[in-house]
Image: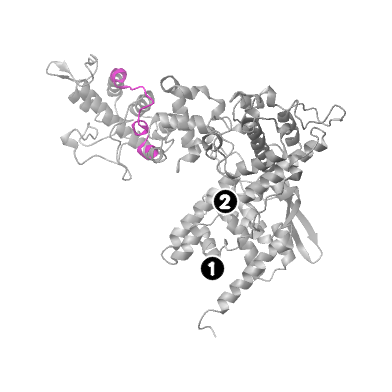
Amino acid sequence: MASDPAAPHRSAPPGVPSDPENPATQGRRRRGAGQPMAPTRYLGAHHFAFYRGVLEGLDLAELGARYLETGRDRRQARLTQQTIEAELHRGVRRLQPVDGAFGDDGGARAPKKLPDEPTWQALFRSTGKGVPGRMRARQLAALDAARPFLTRTPTPADAVAGWFAPAVAARLAAAGLATLADLQACVVARGVRWYRRVPRIGAVTAQRIVAWLQTEIGALGALGALAPAALAPRRALTTAARAALRPAAVMIAPLEALLVPADRDGRTGHNRSGPEAHARIAAQQDLAAIQAWLATRGAEHGPTWRTYRCHAERLLLWAVFVRGKALSDLTVEDCTAYLAFLADPQPAAQWIGHRGVPRYSYEWRPFAGPLSPASLRQSFTVVSGLCAWLVDAQYLRYNPWALVAKPKVPRSRIQVSRSFTKTQWAFLQRCAAELPADDLRDARLLFLLRFAYATGLRIAELSRATVGDLRHRDLPDDPRGSWELVFTGKGTLEREVHVSHAVIGALRRYLFARGLTTDFNRLLPATPLIGRVKADGRMGALSVQQIHAILKRFFRRAAAMLEGEDPTGASRVASASAHWLRHSFGNHAIAHGVALDVVQSQLGHASLATTSVYVRAEAERRAQELERPGIF
């Protein structure tokens, strides 16, 4: 093991860091968890600051948290310490004169205070708290003497393997971020959530990497152009700060960064209401009219609002930049042409981009690909509704979409096959119950599984559920009463979902594990039922994406455990998502004889015909089971 600062450090042989160029250390190089040391590692100012702390006997975890992208990980800090010692040894060797000349540092002369190689080896034989004060002073002086000659300034062409811990560098390189230039471009293009492109790089590690990049702005260039606003969560920014991220321009851009040419802004559109009309909105341009409509579409930046904005945005951009006219100039023929465009947005380079790119990035595009028939039908519904609203507001004279046939799509059925069998569900419950009880993330997973399955909630509803949504009602025949979750569900309709006493008990245990009171009346109404686990103890709700990732990770882990026993079942479990729990509730409830209207109410289906899919699925399953050969 490498040294801990609390004890003298001893390497093999004493005083000589592992070095593949040194025959005396061949075969003794330590690699740590099978991870080889990078063939070329650069030493930056942060490495010298880190190693100076090691020499002064400071705690490795604290030094790692301050200077390294790996944070408080002691093992990674020890590996970095070994790497620094090896690179220092190589550097001192290069600075030594050879036959009257100097080493391979391009003629650089060694500083007078820099010890020769044997003296360096003896001087750094021991490091840490056990080193006498006079010896430590000599070590620090030698380190300061070597620093100007061995410190490297990063360049965009440098490989990430030269600057980051091997495990981190390997993950970055596997995601296509092989150089600092690649990494910088990804951060600039994707913003604060750039790390979602890199498997097994989390938010904390990403913040440390970005912090280091920001300290090197002078060497790496353009990253500073978007800092700090582009690297902060959008919800933490003011409206002015968000607008400043991307100035308005005449180009394919988000609504908030769009500058519409005067001849296409809709002021003189042929479909504008005449002067005799009594306009109900103040907007005089198409963009302002769309923004007025969006203001009436529910909570800003909510999922429904974002959907409306997306479809209206696409229509306006297409009208201005493809059709070359204002939205208030569109005709029935234009509307028909727009539907064809949605099925194949071309040229793709201008219209299609990657999902997840921040709206302030110039890499943003309105589409992630051609629209499916169902999405095309949804777009028709939204933009037709937009124009109908503008007619009602007396901004437009007529709705051009009213004469266009609504696209038809094959009637889709709920895919109830995407659910767990009772055996698979029992297996998943056992897997969750065997997780460490003292791990708060595992406690959250155990409750999340039970809560999602027992209520049949959609993943977005799970994310939004709070203590304030819980309601208790007295029952004449049950002294315990009943618990319900009351909230606004899909389609802005109020829903009431029954929560069993068993789930309420599980919720109280989970709240206790989070360090909260189990008395719901003493909790803030906004307290999320499924909370985030944060090192600083702050509360917060999980996003839809986070819940999806937590469950997918658990399903894959459970599938690996099931592989040897049931390969087919393991494959199904590995492909499962959060929505499988909702379908499993529907299937299992019908199988247990729960009334169809009760299941409909619990799942929030608008039509009983939708819920009947589970009945047909259960009948088909019974028929298949009873038709197996040899049963009768």
- Nearest the viewer among 364 and 91 is 364
In this rendering, would 228 be left or right of 131? right
Q: Which residues are magenta?
A: 144-169
Counting other residues with Cα less than 10 Å from the Cα at mark 1, is it few (<14), some (14-19), or many (20 or more)?
A: few
Which part of the image, by quadrant, shows the C terminus? bottom right
Mark 2 residue type:
Arg
Residue 529 seen in the figure: no
- Identify the secondary structure beneath mark 1: helix
Q: Is residue 327 visible?
A: yes
Q: Are marks 1 and 2 in contact (CB under 8 Å)?
A: no
The image quarter in which residue 538 lies = top right
| Horizontal and vertical percent position of residue 193 | 53, 36
Indicate whether 419 appears above or below 161: below
Count all numbered tags in the image, as a single digit. 2
Question: Comparing marks 1 and 2, which lies closer to the viewer?
Answer: 1
Q: Please tell me which residue lies in front, 275 or 417.
A: 275
SS state under label 2: helix
Is 53 situated above or below 559? above
Counting from the top left corner in percent of width and height, residue 597 is at 74, 65
Q: Residue at x 47, y 28 (%)?
A: 211
Of the numbered discs 1 and 2, the one sitting upstream in the chain is 1
Magenta segment includes 146: yes
**Residue that sits furthest to the left in the current view:** 99
Estimate the x, y position of residue 504 in percent, counting from the top left: 67, 57
Question: Which dot marks residue 444?
Answer: 2
Judge from the rendering whether residue 123 lies leftward or rightward of residue 297; answer left or right: left
